[in-house]
Image (tube, rainbow, N blue to C red):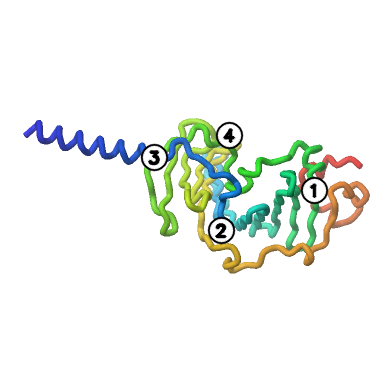
Amino acid sequence: MLKTVFSVCSVLLMSLTACQSQLPSPLQIQAVEAMPPLAAEFETEVLETDTHGDETTRVYRWRFVRHADRVETHNLSDDSGEVWRRLAGGDIAYQKVFHGQRQTIDYQPGDLKALAAVPDWRAVATLLSPAELGGLQADGEESALGRVALRYRSGQGEIEELLWLNREQLPALIRRQERGHLLVTRLAALYPTGQAPWPELRDEDYGHTDYADLGDKEGDPFVKSILPTLKGGHHHEH
């Protein structure tokens, strides 16, 4: 009887090990050219604990739209956004968007280089930086929005848990520690590009200010109000 029990346990253990070995570990990101266009809505919870041990939770809803050479995000909490564009030579241009004022601040590739703010395009397109992937190890599968998601965990680094939609090349959940806070980001909705129930930004509908021209407009009420939110804006020198 004991031999039978041990035999069954051994078979189960071998089966589980085989299932685990079929999962990519660590997580592998596809080439950026192969990432499918899509639109998604996320919810991020920020859990903070004060010096008295009291916890507070802030919740943010935001949108994400990915094309082959363009990524747009929209923070619904403050009606601001960002647009990243990958140009023909591989350089990246950036816009900080203020939807309420229908204005954008436009950064050319040279501006980002001068500010040491050139991003990794793969991180922009997947919401995961290469540095965060090294400590992730496969830990099974789950269902997310009716899709199979690969679960990864990490005992090191900022990310504690990740649910990854391999076909979509997008996280369904990211649980991470950042600056002493716990951030939990969950995928709330996913759409094919062009079928999301919100319009994408159209450049012609917005006024544009070049980052290089901010020094000439620091007396403008709008520019003055948004300078602290800009990359390098509150340290701008003309």
**Which numbered disc flags the more N-terminal residue, 4 or 1?**
1
Mark 4 and mark 1: span between their CA atoms?
Answer: 25 Å
Residue 107, numbered label: 1
Q: Are marks 1 and 3 in contact (CB under 8 Å)?
A: no
Label 4 residue SS: helix
> Tag 1: Cα neighbours inside 10 Å, few (<14), some, or many (≥20)?
many
Q: Amino acid under label 4?
A: Ala
Residue 131, numbered label: 4
Q: Position of residue 168 (x, y in %)?
A: 51, 53
Tell me the quadrant of the picture where the C terminus can be found.
top right
The image shows residue 66, relative to residue 158, as above or below, that is below
**Which numbered disc flags the more N-terminal residue, 3 or 4?**
4
Q: Are marks 2 and 1 in contact (CB under 8 Å)?
A: no
63 sits left or right of 21 in the view: right
Q: Residue at x 77, y 62 (%)?
A: 203
Q: Residue at x 74, y 45 (%)?
A: 89
Tell me the quadrant of the picture where the N terminus can be found.
top left
Residue 139, numbered label: 3
Q: Are marks 3 and 4 in contact (CB under 8 Å)?
A: no
Q: Residue at x 73, y 46 (%)?
A: 92
Q: Choose between 223 and 48: the one closer to the eye.
A: 223
Q: Are marks 2 and 4 in contact (CB under 8 Å)?
A: no
203 sits left or right of 18 in the view: right
> Tag 3: Cα neighbours inside 10 Å, few (<14), some, or many (≥20)?
many
